[in-house]
Protein backbone atom coordinates (compact mmCIF):
# COMPACT_ATOMS: atom_id res chain seq x y z
CA UNK A 1 0.00 0.00 0.00
CA UNK A 2 1.45 3.36 -1.05
CA UNK A 3 1.38 6.26 1.37
CA UNK A 4 2.22 9.82 0.49
CA UNK A 5 3.93 11.83 3.17
CA UNK A 6 1.94 14.91 4.18
CA UNK A 7 4.04 18.03 3.85
CA UNK A 8 4.58 20.03 6.99
CA UNK A 9 1.98 22.77 7.44
CA UNK A 10 3.03 26.35 6.75
CA UNK A 11 0.86 28.71 8.76
CA UNK A 12 -0.34 32.19 7.89
CA UNK A 13 0.88 33.63 11.20
CA UNK A 14 1.19 31.52 14.33
CA UNK A 15 2.55 32.16 17.85
CA UNK A 16 6.34 32.44 18.07
CA UNK A 17 7.83 32.25 21.55
CA UNK A 18 11.31 33.65 22.17
CA UNK A 19 14.31 31.34 21.87
CA UNK A 20 15.59 32.82 25.12
CA UNK A 21 12.53 31.69 27.09
CA UNK A 22 11.72 35.20 28.34
CA UNK A 23 8.01 34.37 28.53
CA UNK A 24 8.45 31.39 30.85
CA UNK A 25 10.56 33.43 33.26
CA UNK A 26 7.70 35.85 33.84
CA UNK A 27 5.05 33.12 33.88
CA UNK A 28 7.07 31.12 36.41
CA UNK A 29 7.30 34.22 38.59
CA UNK A 30 3.49 34.52 38.50
CA UNK A 31 3.17 30.89 39.62
CA UNK A 32 5.91 31.14 42.24
CA UNK A 33 4.26 34.18 43.82
CA UNK A 34 0.74 32.70 43.40
CA UNK A 35 -0.46 35.75 41.41
CA UNK A 36 -2.73 33.72 39.12
CA UNK A 37 -5.26 36.53 38.86
CA UNK A 38 -6.24 39.53 36.72
CA UNK A 39 -3.78 41.68 38.64
CA UNK A 40 -0.16 41.49 39.71
CA UNK A 41 3.33 42.67 38.81
CA UNK A 42 3.24 41.24 35.28
CA UNK A 43 0.10 43.22 34.47
CA UNK A 44 1.61 46.41 35.88
CA UNK A 45 4.94 45.72 34.19
CA UNK A 46 3.41 44.93 30.81
CA UNK A 47 1.37 48.15 30.87
CA UNK A 48 4.42 50.18 31.83
CA UNK A 49 6.79 48.53 29.34
CA UNK A 50 4.44 48.67 26.35
CA UNK A 51 3.58 52.32 27.04
CA UNK A 52 7.31 53.11 27.14
CA UNK A 53 7.93 51.12 23.96
CA UNK A 54 5.36 53.00 21.88
CA UNK A 55 5.82 56.37 23.58
CA UNK A 56 2.47 56.69 25.32
CA UNK A 57 1.91 58.01 28.86
CA UNK A 58 -0.45 55.27 30.07
CA UNK A 59 -1.79 51.84 29.17
CA UNK A 60 -4.45 49.40 30.38
CA UNK A 61 -3.91 45.66 29.83
CA UNK A 62 -7.18 44.03 28.80
CA UNK A 63 -8.61 40.67 27.76
CA UNK A 64 -8.63 41.48 24.01
CA UNK A 65 -8.12 44.17 21.42
CA UNK A 66 -11.90 44.21 20.98
CA UNK A 67 -12.32 45.04 24.67
CA UNK A 68 -9.79 47.85 24.21
CA UNK A 69 -11.78 49.34 21.32
CA UNK A 70 -14.98 49.06 23.36
CA UNK A 71 -13.50 50.94 26.32
CA UNK A 72 -11.89 53.51 24.01
CA UNK A 73 -15.31 54.28 22.52
CA UNK A 74 -16.79 54.51 26.01
CA UNK A 75 -13.93 56.75 27.17
CA UNK A 76 -14.52 58.99 24.15
CA UNK A 77 -18.13 59.42 25.24
CA UNK A 78 -19.70 57.37 22.43
CA UNK A 79 -23.23 56.32 23.37
CA UNK A 80 -26.63 55.45 21.98
CA UNK A 81 -27.38 57.00 18.60
CA UNK A 82 -23.92 58.53 18.17
CA UNK A 83 -22.23 58.26 14.77
CA UNK A 84 -18.79 56.67 14.50
CA UNK A 85 -16.80 56.64 11.26
CA UNK A 86 -15.07 53.31 10.67
CA UNK A 87 -13.04 51.90 7.76
CA UNK A 88 -14.96 49.36 5.75
CA UNK A 89 -11.83 47.31 4.95
CA UNK A 90 -11.13 45.75 8.34
CA UNK A 91 -11.95 42.81 10.57
CA UNK A 92 -15.36 42.88 12.28
CA UNK A 93 -13.71 43.37 15.68
CA UNK A 94 -13.16 47.02 14.71
CA UNK A 95 -16.85 47.63 14.08
CA UNK A 96 -18.55 45.36 16.63
CA UNK A 97 -17.84 47.55 19.69
CA UNK A 98 -19.64 50.46 18.01
CA UNK A 99 -22.77 48.32 18.19
CA UNK A 100 -21.97 47.37 21.83
CA UNK A 101 -22.36 51.08 22.61
CA UNK A 102 -25.64 51.27 20.63
CA UNK A 103 -23.94 53.73 18.30
CA UNK A 104 -24.17 53.91 14.50
CA UNK A 105 -21.22 52.91 12.30
CA UNK A 106 -20.73 54.71 9.01
CA UNK A 107 -18.22 52.87 6.84
CA UNK A 108 -15.48 54.73 4.97
CA UNK A 109 -13.72 53.53 1.81
CA UNK A 110 -10.00 52.85 1.43
CA UNK A 111 -7.46 54.38 -0.95
CA UNK A 112 -4.89 52.53 -3.07
CA UNK A 113 -2.02 54.56 -1.60
CA UNK A 114 -2.35 53.03 1.88
CA UNK A 115 -5.13 50.38 1.70
CA UNK A 116 -6.47 52.26 4.73
CA UNK A 117 -9.10 54.94 5.35
CA UNK A 118 -9.25 57.39 2.47
CA UNK A 119 -8.88 61.00 3.66
CA UNK A 120 -10.99 62.12 0.65
CA UNK A 121 -13.81 59.74 1.55
CA UNK A 122 -13.50 60.85 5.19
CA UNK A 123 -13.98 64.48 4.15
CA UNK A 124 -17.10 63.52 2.18
CA UNK A 125 -18.42 61.58 5.19
CA UNK A 126 -18.10 64.69 7.39
CA UNK A 127 -20.03 66.69 4.79
CA UNK A 128 -22.80 64.11 4.89
CA UNK A 129 -22.71 63.49 8.66
CA UNK A 130 -21.34 66.58 10.47
CA UNK A 131 -22.45 65.35 13.90
CA UNK A 132 -19.83 62.65 14.51
CA UNK A 133 -18.68 61.47 17.93
CA UNK A 134 -15.54 59.52 16.99
CA UNK A 135 -13.42 58.30 14.10
CA UNK A 136 -11.94 54.80 14.22
CA UNK A 137 -8.78 54.46 12.11
CA UNK A 138 -7.21 51.09 11.26
CA UNK A 139 -3.61 50.34 10.25
CA UNK A 140 -4.32 47.34 8.04
CA UNK A 141 -1.82 44.46 7.83
CA UNK A 142 0.77 46.69 9.51
CA UNK A 143 0.52 49.48 6.92
CA UNK A 144 0.05 52.93 8.42
CA UNK A 145 -2.91 55.07 7.45
CA UNK A 146 -2.04 58.60 6.29
CA UNK A 147 -2.29 60.01 9.81
CA UNK A 148 -1.31 63.63 9.08
CA UNK A 149 -4.21 64.09 6.67
CA UNK A 150 -6.66 62.14 8.83
CA UNK A 151 -5.71 63.98 12.05
CA UNK A 152 -5.96 67.35 10.29
CA UNK A 153 -9.51 66.53 9.15
CA UNK A 154 -10.55 65.21 12.56
CA UNK A 155 -9.09 68.19 14.43
CA UNK A 156 -10.94 70.54 12.08
CA UNK A 157 -14.18 68.82 13.09
CA UNK A 158 -13.15 68.49 16.75
CA UNK A 159 -13.81 64.76 16.92
CA UNK A 160 -12.15 62.01 18.98
CA UNK A 161 -9.76 59.69 17.13
CA UNK A 162 -9.27 56.02 18.08
CA UNK A 163 -6.52 54.06 16.34
CA UNK A 164 -7.04 50.34 15.84
CA UNK A 165 -3.39 49.31 15.71
CA UNK A 166 -4.19 45.64 16.39
CA UNK A 167 -2.18 44.62 13.33
CA UNK A 168 0.49 47.33 13.45
CA UNK A 169 2.46 47.08 16.70
CA UNK A 170 6.00 48.04 15.68
CA UNK A 171 4.88 50.11 12.68
CA UNK A 172 6.05 53.72 12.47
CA UNK A 173 4.46 56.68 10.74
CA UNK A 174 7.04 59.42 10.20
CA UNK A 175 9.16 58.01 13.03
CA UNK A 176 6.32 57.70 15.53
CA UNK A 177 4.52 54.49 16.58
CA UNK A 178 1.08 53.89 15.15
CA UNK A 179 -1.52 53.87 17.90
CA UNK A 180 -0.15 57.07 19.46
CA UNK A 181 -1.55 59.78 17.17
CA UNK A 182 -5.18 59.73 18.21
CA UNK A 183 -6.81 60.19 21.59
CA UNK A 184 -6.69 56.42 22.13
CA UNK A 185 -4.78 53.54 20.57
CA UNK A 186 -5.39 49.83 20.81
CA UNK A 187 -3.15 46.80 20.28
CA UNK A 188 -4.01 43.11 20.05
CA UNK A 189 -2.03 40.11 21.29
CA UNK A 190 -4.22 37.45 19.72
CA UNK A 191 -2.45 34.22 18.72
CA UNK A 192 -1.81 35.36 15.16
CA UNK A 193 -0.46 38.84 15.93
CA UNK A 194 3.18 39.93 15.66
CA UNK A 195 3.60 39.27 19.39
CA UNK A 196 1.05 37.27 21.32
CA UNK A 197 -0.20 36.55 24.82
CA UNK A 198 -2.53 33.85 23.39
CA UNK A 199 -5.32 36.39 23.81
CA UNK A 200 -5.23 39.94 25.10
CA UNK A 201 -5.13 43.60 24.20
CA UNK A 202 -3.88 46.98 25.36
CA UNK A 203 -5.47 50.42 25.43
CA UNK A 204 -3.01 53.33 25.36
CA UNK A 205 -3.45 57.08 25.70
CA UNK A 206 -1.68 60.19 26.92
CA UNK A 207 -4.79 60.89 28.99
CA UNK A 208 -3.82 59.06 32.19
CA UNK A 209 -7.14 59.89 33.87
CA UNK A 210 -9.13 58.19 31.09
CA UNK A 211 -6.89 55.11 31.21
CA UNK A 212 -7.46 54.87 34.96
CA UNK A 213 -11.19 55.07 34.27
CA UNK A 214 -10.89 52.31 31.67
CA UNK A 215 -9.16 50.07 34.21
CA UNK A 216 -12.03 50.77 36.62
CA UNK A 217 -14.66 49.80 34.02
CA UNK A 218 -12.62 46.72 33.10
CA UNK A 219 -12.74 45.43 36.70
CA UNK A 220 -16.55 45.45 36.94
CA UNK A 221 -16.63 49.14 37.94
CA UNK A 222 -16.14 48.16 41.55
CA UNK A 223 -16.30 51.25 43.76
CA UNK A 224 -13.83 51.82 46.57
CA UNK A 225 -15.92 50.51 49.46
CA UNK A 226 -15.66 47.77 52.08
CA UNK A 227 -18.62 45.98 50.50
CA UNK A 228 -19.20 45.27 46.80
CA UNK A 229 -20.66 48.46 45.39
CA UNK A 230 -21.16 49.45 41.77
CA UNK A 231 -22.28 52.89 40.65
CA UNK A 232 -21.57 52.28 36.95
CA UNK A 233 -21.91 49.44 34.46
CA UNK A 234 -18.77 47.33 34.56
CA UNK A 235 -17.02 44.77 32.38
CA UNK A 236 -14.82 41.75 33.04
CA UNK A 237 -12.04 42.91 30.72
CA UNK A 238 -8.79 42.82 32.72
CA UNK A 239 -5.80 40.83 31.52
CA UNK A 240 -4.56 38.00 33.74
CA UNK A 241 -1.15 38.16 35.39
CA UNK A 242 -0.10 34.90 33.69
CA UNK A 243 -1.01 36.17 30.20
CA UNK A 244 0.71 39.49 30.91
CA UNK A 245 3.88 37.55 31.73
CA UNK A 246 3.87 36.08 28.24
CA UNK A 247 3.41 39.59 26.86
CA UNK A 248 6.38 40.99 28.78
CA UNK A 249 8.59 38.26 27.34
CA UNK A 250 7.23 38.73 23.82
CA UNK A 251 7.80 42.48 23.95
CA UNK A 252 11.54 41.82 24.28
CA UNK A 253 11.60 40.21 20.82
CA UNK A 254 9.22 42.59 19.01
CA UNK A 255 12.00 44.23 17.00
CA UNK A 256 13.24 40.79 15.88
CA UNK A 257 9.74 39.85 14.76
CA UNK A 258 9.33 43.09 12.79
CA UNK A 259 12.68 42.47 11.08
CA UNK A 260 11.64 38.93 10.11
CA UNK A 261 8.23 40.12 8.80
CA UNK A 262 10.09 42.66 6.65
CA UNK A 263 12.41 39.92 5.38
CA UNK A 264 9.41 37.76 4.40
CA UNK A 265 7.75 40.66 2.57
CA UNK A 266 10.91 41.57 0.66
CA UNK A 267 11.44 37.90 -0.27
CA UNK A 268 7.94 37.63 -1.75
CA UNK A 269 8.18 40.97 -3.51
CA UNK A 270 11.53 40.07 -5.06
CA UNK A 271 10.42 36.61 -6.20
CA UNK A 272 6.82 37.32 -7.23
CA UNK A 273 6.62 41.07 -7.87
CA UNK A 274 7.59 40.79 -11.54
CA UNK A 275 4.89 38.25 -12.40
CA UNK A 276 2.18 39.50 -14.73
CA UNK A 277 -0.77 41.04 -12.91
CA UNK A 278 0.87 40.91 -9.45
CA UNK A 279 1.09 43.98 -7.23
CA UNK A 280 2.15 44.04 -3.60
CA UNK A 281 0.97 46.13 -0.68
CA UNK A 282 1.77 49.83 -1.15
CA UNK A 283 4.85 51.38 0.40
CA UNK A 284 5.17 55.05 1.28
CA UNK A 285 8.27 57.03 2.21
CA UNK A 286 6.66 58.04 5.53
CA UNK A 287 5.67 54.51 6.47
CA UNK A 288 7.82 51.88 8.24
CA UNK A 289 5.43 48.90 8.28
CA UNK A 290 5.70 45.78 10.41
CA UNK A 291 4.29 43.83 7.40
CA UNK A 292 2.21 41.67 9.74
CA UNK A 293 0.75 39.87 6.71
CA UNK A 294 2.38 40.14 3.29
CA UNK A 295 -0.49 40.69 0.87
CA UNK A 296 -0.73 41.08 -2.88
CA UNK A 297 -3.33 42.04 -5.47
CA UNK A 298 -3.88 39.94 -8.61
CA UNK A 299 -5.24 41.73 -11.68
CA UNK A 300 -4.43 39.18 -14.40
CA UNK A 301 -5.67 35.72 -15.37
CA UNK A 302 -4.47 34.12 -12.13
CA UNK A 303 -7.06 34.82 -9.44
CA UNK A 304 -6.79 34.83 -5.63
CA UNK A 305 -8.82 31.61 -5.43
CA UNK A 306 -6.29 29.92 -7.76
CA UNK A 307 -3.45 30.92 -5.45
CA UNK A 308 -5.26 29.89 -2.28
CA UNK A 309 -6.31 26.50 -3.68
CA UNK A 310 -2.82 25.77 -5.03
CA UNK A 311 -1.27 26.62 -1.66
CA UNK A 312 -3.83 24.56 0.24
CA UNK A 313 -2.94 21.51 -1.87
CA UNK A 314 0.61 21.97 -0.59
CA UNK A 315 -0.63 22.28 3.02
CA UNK A 316 0.10 26.02 3.05
CA UNK A 317 -2.29 28.46 4.72
CA UNK A 318 -3.38 31.70 3.06
CA UNK A 319 -6.53 33.84 3.11
CA UNK A 320 -8.40 36.54 1.21
CA UNK A 321 -8.09 40.21 2.10
CA UNK A 322 -10.76 41.26 4.62
CA UNK A 323 -14.28 41.41 3.23
CA UNK A 324 -15.49 45.03 3.60
CA UNK A 325 -17.90 45.66 6.46
CA UNK A 326 -20.53 47.33 4.27
CA UNK A 327 -20.81 44.03 2.34
CA UNK A 328 -21.28 41.94 5.49
CA UNK A 329 -24.82 40.65 6.16
CA UNK A 330 -24.90 42.13 9.66
CA UNK A 331 -23.57 45.57 8.70
CA UNK A 332 -25.00 46.11 5.21
CA UNK A 333 -27.88 48.22 6.59
CA UNK A 334 -25.41 50.95 7.60
CA UNK A 335 -24.25 53.67 5.22
CA UNK A 336 -21.02 53.54 3.24
CA UNK A 337 -19.12 56.56 1.92
CA UNK A 338 -16.72 56.10 -0.98
CA UNK A 339 -16.39 54.33 -4.31
CA UNK A 340 -15.26 50.74 -4.83
CA UNK A 341 -11.61 50.67 -3.70
CA UNK A 342 -12.15 48.41 -0.68
CA UNK A 343 -14.32 46.08 -2.74
CA UNK A 344 -11.69 45.80 -5.48
CA UNK A 345 -8.96 45.07 -2.92
CA UNK A 346 -11.15 42.35 -1.41
CA UNK A 347 -11.96 40.77 -4.77
CA UNK A 348 -8.35 40.77 -5.94
CA UNK A 349 -6.32 40.49 -2.74
CA UNK A 350 -4.68 37.51 -1.06
CA UNK A 351 -2.65 37.30 2.16
CA UNK A 352 0.41 35.06 1.94
CA UNK A 353 1.86 33.03 4.82
CA UNK A 354 3.89 35.42 6.96
CA UNK A 355 4.85 33.24 9.90
CA UNK A 356 8.07 34.45 11.52
CA UNK A 357 9.19 30.84 12.08
CA UNK A 358 9.29 30.21 8.31
CA UNK A 359 12.65 29.19 6.84
CA UNK A 360 13.98 30.17 3.42
CA UNK A 361 13.03 26.66 2.33
CA UNK A 362 9.44 27.33 3.43
CA UNK A 363 9.41 30.62 1.56
CA UNK A 364 10.74 28.91 -1.57
CA UNK A 365 7.97 26.34 -1.26
CA UNK A 366 5.34 29.09 -1.21
CA UNK A 367 6.96 30.99 -4.08
CA UNK A 368 7.42 27.96 -6.33
CA UNK A 369 3.80 26.91 -5.78
CA UNK A 370 2.56 30.34 -6.88
CA UNK A 371 5.01 30.61 -9.80
CA UNK A 372 3.64 27.31 -11.06
CA UNK A 373 0.32 29.04 -11.74
CA UNK A 374 1.96 31.49 -14.13
Image (cartoon, helix red, strand yellow):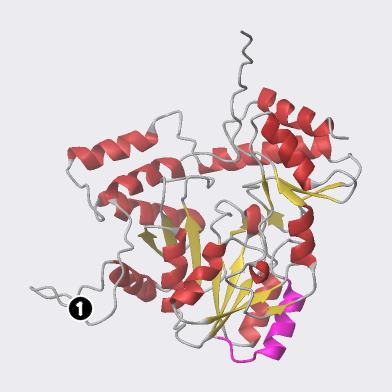
Secondary element at tag 1? loop
Residue 271 seen in render: yes
Rendering quarter of residue 324: bottom right
Residue 181 % position (x, y): 57, 69
Q: Which quadrant is home to the C terminus?
A: top right
Range drawn in magenta = 118-132
Residue 180 seen in render: no
- Residue at (52%, 63%) from the top-left corner? 93
Q: Is residue 132 above or below residue 282?
A: below
- Which residue extends farthest left? 226
**Tag 1 residue:** 230
Q: Is residue 21 left or right of residue 88?
A: left
Residue 121 is one of the magenta-drawn residues: yes
- Residue at (79%, 34%) from the top-left corner? 370
Q: Is residue 275 above or below residue 115?
A: above
Residue 295 is one of the magenta-drawn residues: no
Q: Is residue 210 above or below residue 281?
A: below
* Number of numbered discs: 1
Q: Provide the major secondary structure of the magenta segment.
A: helix
Residue 109 % position (x, y): 72, 71
Amino acid sequence: MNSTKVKERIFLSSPHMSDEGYEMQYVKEAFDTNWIAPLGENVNGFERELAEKVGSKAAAALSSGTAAIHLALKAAGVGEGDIVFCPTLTFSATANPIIYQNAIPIFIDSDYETWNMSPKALEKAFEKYPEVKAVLVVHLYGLSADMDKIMEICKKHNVAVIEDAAESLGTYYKGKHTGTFGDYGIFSFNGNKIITTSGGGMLVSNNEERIAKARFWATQSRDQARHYQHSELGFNYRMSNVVAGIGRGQLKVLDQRVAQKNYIYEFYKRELGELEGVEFMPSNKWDEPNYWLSSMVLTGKVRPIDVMEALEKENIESRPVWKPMHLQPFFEKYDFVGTDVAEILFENGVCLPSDTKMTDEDLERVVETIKGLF
